[in-house]
Image (tube, rainbow, N blue to C red):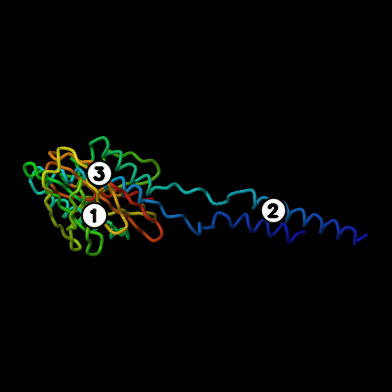
Amino acid sequence: MLGAVLLAIVFFIGIPFAQVAFTAPTKDLPFLANNLRLEYPAAYNLGLNKSQSVAVLSNFTRFVNATLADKLVNFTAFWLVSVNASTNLNITAGNFLGGNATILLTIGSASTNLSVQTNSTNTTLFTAPGATFNLTIQAGGFTETVQWLRDKANLYVFFELRRNADTVREEIIA
Amino acid sequence: MRGFWFMVEAALAGLILTAFVAFLVSTNLSAAETDYTAIAYTILADLNEQDLLKPLAQSGNFSGINSLLTIASVNHTVQICTPQACTGPAPTGTNVWVGSYLVPGVGIYNPKEVRLYLSS
């Protein structure tokens, strides 16, 4: 009995000296995703103000990639922007997915295969798409259809944040 | 008679050990830790929602951002980082948590990362 009492006493005396062996790491990816969801359109607007939307989006994507790499977050992104050219439409794609990509863009009956080198952009022209149109974007196994206005600066962004087993994917349509 | 008292002593020892194990099972001895990293991220996002963060980040005013904060039980410092360097004091303390907010710019494109360090 004395041994049992001593064992219990020793345990309770030792509790204050115990250190927490493990704490779960914070799930910061949702916070970062929310940040980017708000700021990608803001970056695009800043670029539009200086007629440098593609350059600004490219630069911002590289900035985000470098900053998140410090946090051991793998960031990949793909975006499309459109600008009207009279009644026609210029669509520029930015590929920051980590490899070369071929994107199939479809408006109505018109389709274009747009090849974009990794970490770069490429542009294609659609003829007379209509004031309002549906743009279908296909790349790999991914398909998305967005409704855009020809006479508006449009933005579509797909990005992925990945750290170990945690992944967050978001789309931005603006 | 001595054997009887040995039995009583053994029974009492067993009771003490059983109560001890029951206490371990029923009690969470690890205090739940406050998630200061999530707090840091949330604070920066809230400052941005209030349109307070971007103007100060644009001008590199890390002390101005820091002075907006009142956080109990931890110290807080702010750094503003460009792709080239960070300005603002480094955190001190044994435990440090950090949250970030990326800002593309205000009026012109000038990307910055605002870091909020919480430390104890």
Q: Amino acid at mark 2?
A: Phe
> Are both tags, 1 and 2, on one chain?
no
In 3D space, how far apart are the residues under numbered discs 1 and 2 (Cα atoms)? Answer: 59 Å
Residue neighbourhood size for the residue with mark 2, other residues' Cα within 10 Å, grouped as few (<14), some (14–19), many (≥20): some
Q: Position of residue B41 (x, y in %)?
A: 33, 46
Mark drawn on residue A146: 3
Q: Chain of mark 3?
A: A
Q: Position of residue B99 (x, y in %)?
A: 32, 49
- Tell whether B27 sits left or right of B93: right
Q: Amino acid at mark 1?
A: Phe
Task: Name the residue at 58% across, 55% down.
Answer: A15
Mark drawn on residue A78: 1
Q: Nearer the viewer, residue A20 or A59?
A: A59
Labels 3 and 2 touching (C-beta < 8 A): no
> Are both tags, 3 and 2, on one chain?
no
Question: Which residue reaches farthest top?
Answer: B50
Mark drawn on residue B20: 2
Residue neighbourhood size for the residue with mark 3, other residues' Cα within 10 Å, grouped as few (<14), some (14–19), many (≥20): some
Vertical side of A15 occupied by B108: above or below: above
Question: Which residue reaches farthest right?
Answer: B1
Closer to the chain start, of discs 1 and 3, is 1
